[in-house]
Amino acid sequence: MLTAFGKIVRKLRIDSEETLGQMALNLGRSPTFLTAVETGRKPVPDDYLNEVMTYFGLSQSERDQLRHSAEVSRPSVKFNLPVGTPTEQRAFLALLEKHLGNLNKDEVAKMMQVLDQKETGTA
C-alpha cells in the first residue's frame, strides 16, 4: 500500500511518463529503495525528498505538499520537548500515543481543529 508520499511520487512519474526503474536509474537509487520509501517500509530520507523535488522541478507549493506528505508518511514521530515542558503537556503526549489508534475520525477532527486554530492564530 502506498503512503501519501508514495501516491504523489507515483503520480509525478505517471504524469512524466516515466517508470520506477527509469527514475531509480536517473537518481542513482535502486528500484527496491524507491518502492520501500513509497510504501512506507523505509522512512523518506531528507536527501531523497530534496532529490525528488529537484528531479521533477516542483513549484514551491508542490514542494510544500510533497514535504507535508513525507512528514505524514513517517512510521514514527519524535517529539523534542524543550527543557521545562510542563508535566501536563508530557502526560498529554503519553496519553495521545497510548490512545491514538482508538480515536475515531470525529475525535481526531476535533483535535485537529484546535491545533489548526493555534497554527493560524485564530484560537
Image (spheres, helix red, strand yellow):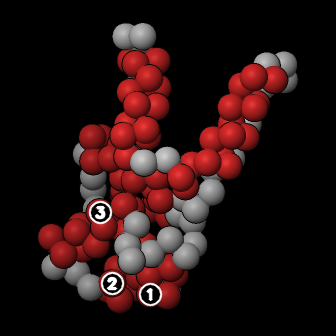
- Residue under numbered circle 1: 31
- Residue under numbered circle 3: 8
- Residue 110 position, x and y percent, is 40, 31
Contact (CB < 8 A) between labels 2 and 1? Answer: yes
Q: Residue at x 22, y 69 (%)?
A: 11
Amino acid identity at mark 2 = Leu
**Residue 92's image quarter?**
top right
Q: Which residue is drawn at 61% across and 48% down?
A: 99
- Residue under numbered circle 2: 20
- Assign a secondary structure to mark 3: helix
Give whichever of 21, 111 is nearer the camera: 111
Rendered-image quadrant of the C terminus = top left
Contact (CB < 8 A) between labels 3 and 1? Answer: no
Q: Along the polypeptide, which appears first: circle 3 or circle 1?
A: 3
Residue 21 as seen in the image, left or right of residue 100: left
Q: Residues within 10 Å of mark 2 (few under 14, many from 20)?
A: some
